[in-house]
Amino acid sequence: MKRRSVIAGLGALGLAGCGVGVRFDRPFDLSDLEQRENGRLGLAVRQGAQQMSWRAAERFTYCSTFKLFLAAATLERVARGEERLDRAVPITSEDMVSHAPVTGPALGGELTIEALCRSTVEISDNPAANILIREMGGLDTWRNWYRSMEDSVTRVDRLEPELNAVGDERDTTTPTQAVANMARLLAPGQTRLTAGHQTLLERWLTDTPTGPNRIKAAAPEGWRVGHKTGTSSQGPINDIGVIWPPEGAPIFVAAYYEGPPTDDFAAGEAVIAEAVGRALEALGHG
């Protein structure tokens, strides 16, 4: 993909909730992408002490991108002895909501906690996510996990699929906060996860077949990408994740796009890919 040059400028701002100063010494303008598709775009791309940003402090409906963090929270419970990956959970008709590619066929049977985590990250199974939230203690417990991450920004208000609705601040976050949270979980030597659980989460993120035309489309050929998509026909088309270059620090990416309501996601996906590509170029990966 041929990437256009960024519009350079000067500025400085700390990464909220990260504890590490992040230099916004090369902010850039993505207004042309927004105007082209009549949408609003939020982006934070961080590598080491540098972050490229556009509307990174604004709120966006996160949709299924939260499932990356839900799996991580569950793995932390396992590490504390509060949960087991091999524990089987019954799958009942009361669990069923839309988009159940794994839990639907398992109806009347059981799935392990590990299978529920894997299906919610890799294939974005909605009942699986709701079951994991229920098994950890409900929305209050889930909300408190974010607070334990020093995240006072992310809103937790509803379950799937209601959390995909737009129009207010419920179930929203900012690109800056999403990047800070991913760094706490996946940055080398800084993660809250055990080494084994970090490897497991990264495997789920890299094995997902969803969203190949978003962050993955922007990464240089041969670079490893782990990501979690989030999409709604009401307008949001999102992707968050990690890009691992062959050398150097990992690159954390949070891209949230809110366009006109549609069931055709190609235009929004192209916006994300181009925006992330420009940021990578600005970071020296053109």
Image (cartoon, rainbow, N blue to C red):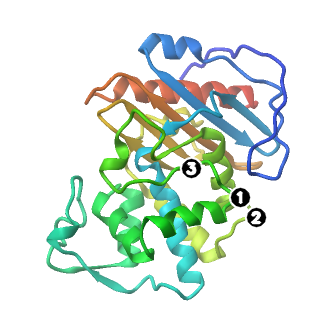
Residue 39 in percent (x, y) is at: 45, 20
Residue located beneath label 3 in the image:
154
Residue 42 in percent (x, y) is at: 57, 30
Q: Could you tell me the amino acid type at mark 1? A: Ala
Q: Does label 2 or label 3 sit earlier along the sequence?
A: 3
Q: Nearer the viewer, mark 1 or mark 3?
A: 3
Q: What residue do we see at 36% from left, 63% from top?
A: 129
Answer yes or no: is residue 244 visible.
no
- SS at circle 2: loop
Circles 1 and 3: CB atoms closer than 8 Å: no
Residue located beneath label 1 in the image:
187
Q: How many marks?
A: 3
Give the answer, above or below, for where 172 lies relative to 158.
above
Q: CA distance from mark 2 to mark 3?
A: 21 Å
Which numbered disc covers residue 42? none
Q: Nearer the viewer, residue 111 or 138?
A: 138
The answer to whether residue 45 is left or right of residue 238 is right
Q: What residue do we see at 50% from left, 36% from top?
A: 60
- SS at circle 1: loop
Q: Could you tell me the amino acid type at mark 3? A: Thr
Q: Quadrant of the C terminus?
A: top right
Q: Could you tell me the amino acid type at mark 2? A: Gln
Q: CA distance from mark 2 to mark 1?
A: 5 Å
Other-residue count near label 1 (Cα within 10 Å), few / some / many at <14 / 14–19 / ≥20: some
Residue located beneath label 2 in the image:
190
Q: Nearer the viewer, residue 118 or 57?
A: 57
